[in-house]
Amino acid sequence: MKTFALCDVNGFYVSCERIFRPELNNQPVIVLSNNDGCVISISDEAKKLGIDMAVPYHEVKHLVNKHNIIWFSSNYCLYGDISQRFNQLLEQHCDQVVSYSVDESFLCFDGNQENLRDTGLRIKNHIQTCLSLPVCVGFGPTKTLAKLANHIAKRNKQASGGVVDLSIKKTREYWLQRTPVNKIWGIGRQLSKALIHNNINTAWDLHEANHAVLRRKYSVNMERMIRELQGMACLEFDQVPSDKKSILNSRSFGHTITEYQDLKEALAYHVTRCCEKLRNQNSLASVMGLFLYGNKKNKAYLYRPSLTVNLSEPTDDTGIFIAAIEQGLKSIFRENTGFKKAGIMLNGLVSKNCYQPDLFTTKKTRPALMQCLDQVNQKYGKDCLKFASLGFAKNWAMRANAKSPNYTTRWTDLIKVR
């Protein structure tokens, strides 16, 4: 019999910052989004002081100053590396692990005879010992119940010890009767309002509902959700995530950009990141979309141009996309216009293994060069080797006034022990 588990790091970004700053344990800490805009990670101590998720920083700045709350700019390079280490530790406990997001992963135990609570506590202690990350683990016969068990474990850390097992029928019924319907994985705000209007207020009410009636009223996904709550696994455990159908990379600028050269460098940076992801999944792209966001007035963009470039053949060569950017940007750029954001999206993706190139094409691809580029950057750091179009000044870079060092991915940021 299969049992699913969801392991989730509590306050992941804050916890990553605390790994290398242990004096911040038990202190109020928050992490902000791009350009130090909104709160995206909060410690329990900061929550008690009135800090909420997704609130603009300027609205809580008075609380930050009043209570001496420590804040950090986002350090995605550090968080991504810690996430990989987190999953590597999980793989020591289960050979079926799939990362669901940067801070949570599903595990699948097939025929496990051990007490699941003991398994969860062992995983929890191992990750705490090796990475100093606090985690909660939820078990269930389906992915939906495992997700719900994890939610319950996080809301009742002291009573549960950070581990909840909903594969036990009595435990499952107890918590389903006490869980609001909007806390079920996959039920959003509007859907929960509709269900409450039909007197379905708790997870138990949905568990007991007629799945055929709700399927006709909503969708087949609703029937799957009900069956999952009843303990019948309908969601597959995907060990290999499917390839992306499109690849997007975009960022807001740290300040308004007006120069053509700065915009070109920003777009070259974004397409470089897109092409790295493209090559990582062994795909080629034939369509590139580039877009810009101008300044706002009365909450509306004054100028928001976009352009789609169709290539004659699918490719993963960064240089070909950068050349297309230089041609396309000229047609949509306006002088003396302020821009706040830019981005690139690659579409028309096909598998590199299945694509048959045109025998008569005049375009030359450089697979050896791209492979060399990726290997050098993987070994010595991002953009150690790059196209000159990316520039060096980075006048378009995001604000990050309180970014922590890249402790694990940059030689100069390694902690020195004397």
Image (spheres, grey):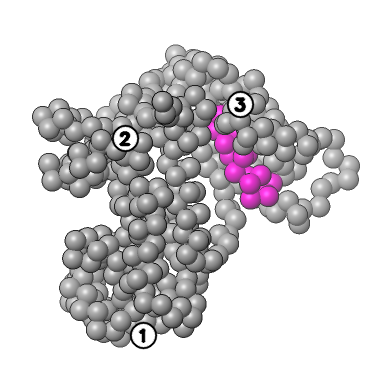
Numbered badge on residue 212: 1
Label 3: few (<14), some (14–19) or many (≥20) C-alpha neighbours in 10 Å: few
Nearer the observer, 20 or 326: 20
Position in image of residue 298 (x %, y %): 27, 29
Is 383 above or below relative to 199? above
Is 301 above or below relative to 208? above
Nearer the observer, 110 or 74: 110
Q: Mark 1 or mark 3, which has the lower sequence index? A: 1
Do residues under tags 2 and 1 come within 8 Å of each other at their CB atoms?
no
State yes or no: residue 280 in magenta. yes
Q: Amino acid at mark 2?
A: Arg
Dot in front, 2 or 3:
2
Do residues under tags 2 and 3 come within 8 Å of each other at their CB atoms?
no
**Residue at figure coordinates x 19%, y 33% from the top left:** 69
Give SS at disc 3: loop
Position in image of residue 229 (x %, y %): 33, 78
**Residue at figure coordinates x 27%, y 62% from the top left:** 162
- Quarter assignment of residue 404: top left
Q: Would residue 36 appear left or right of 105 to someone viewing this image?
A: left
For mark 3, what is the residue?
A: 384
Q: Would residue 362 appear left or right of 86 to someone viewing this image?
A: right
**Residue at figure coordinates x 59%, y 28% from the top left:** 383
Position in image of residue 309 (x %, y %): 64, 37
**Residue at figure coordinates x 58%, y 62% from the top left:** 240
Dot in front, 1 or 3:
3
Instruction: Please state the extent of the stretch shown in magenta in the rendering.
Output: 269-286
State yes or no: residue 282 in magenta. yes
Quadrant assignment for the C terminus: top left
Q: Would residue 18 appear left or right of 339 to someone viewing this image?
A: left
